[in-house]
Amino acid sequence: MQYTTFGRTTGLRVSEVALGAGTFGNRALPGTEPEEARRIVDRFADAGGTFIDAAESYQAGEAEEILGDVLTGRRDRFTLATKFAFGTGGEPGTLGVGNSRAKMRRAVEDSLRRLRTDRIDLLWVHLPDTVTPTDEIVRSLDDLTRQGKILHAGFSNFPAWRTARAAALAEVRGSTPLVGVQFEYSLVERTADREILPMAEALGLGGALWSPLGGGLLTGKYRTGSQGRLTDWAGFVLQKEDSGYKTAVVDAVLDVAAKTGLPAAQVAVAWVRAFAARAATPLVPVIGPRTLAQLDDYLAALDVRLDPEHYDRLDAVSRVPLGQPHQLIADSLPRVLGTDPARFRTPVHPVA
């Protein structure tokens, strides 16, 4: 396991992969029993993992409760992140969900209690509620940081323009800066290449990449009818093999797996890690095993190095059109730079 700071603007140290706790518990959906969750955390720690990612909504709060129990006595060995916005289920009404100052304060207090800790290392705003002003979110995060209840803050699943605005507001006011963004990224979901990744690289934000296996799609198991999130978490899976593009990507992953003798899951994770290594800002895949065996597969991928031929093939088949104005910019670079872009030593990408 290797380590990095989470972004270029903070000393927050994390392991090169994060352990997602979304499956811990059974309160809302079929998931991981507490003792198995403990074994998963133990194995992750033994492998050198230090970054754990949770949320108030995971298993209606049970995931945080399990983590609070599992981490008792060793809390300081981990960078602990959690998220708020969805509440913990039930019928919370409009005051029990969202991004408002009142909801954020209450969510942090509840998460601290469930996690049995005195601080949250990284608090994610899980999703924009579309009604809370960005200014209020930035001020509220700053308040919680000054109180010592959270140490760092980031945006999860936000449009790039909203994150950039929040980062600018925090900078000009001397408020707690955003240190990272969290978004879905895998070989079957690369639309972050258009706006989110260039923004993160320009602003020096860390990136937490959730669902690197596309909800299990990239393992190929759903082609044989195997159970998984597609069957057990109906309605929560964001990726299905419902387009020619996704079929081509899965075909390529399975073909590379056959040629290398590796499980398809390890090929897919190895590609994401190789992609992250080439980025201009630290990117950390968030793995979400439901069993110890699945965790072992993820960890085995840390030792996989794809041949350039296989990496390039997977990159090409999964690449998404950048659209406008990005394609126009790329096509016009030789003219506006006055030469071949390859001749510029400075990286040619959007800069702050």
Image (cartoon, helix red, strand yellow):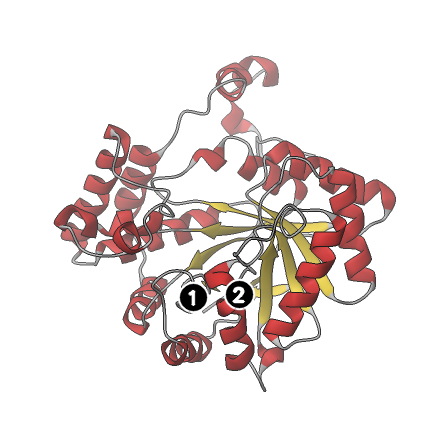
Classify the position of the N terminus by image quarter. Answer: bottom left
Q: Which residue is nearer to you in this view: 343 or 73?
A: 73
Residue 240 image offset from top left, x and y in percent: 29, 40
Q: Residue at x 78, y 60 (%)?
A: 145
Q: Residue at x 37, y 42 (%)?
A: 238
| Relative horizontal placement of residue 237, taking residue 82 as reference (left or right) | left
Residue 215 image offset from top left, x and y in percent: 34, 50
Q: Which residue is nearer to you in this view: 327 or 52?
A: 52
Classify the position of the C terminus by image quarter. Answer: top right
As displayed, is residue 169 above or below residue 286? above
Q: Residue at x 58, y 55 (%)?
A: 87
Q: Residue at x 65, y 66 (%)?
A: 110
Tag of residue 27: 1
Mark 2–mark 1 contact, CB under 8 Å? yes
Mark 2 residue type: Gly
Residue 168 image offset from top left, x and y in percent: 76, 38
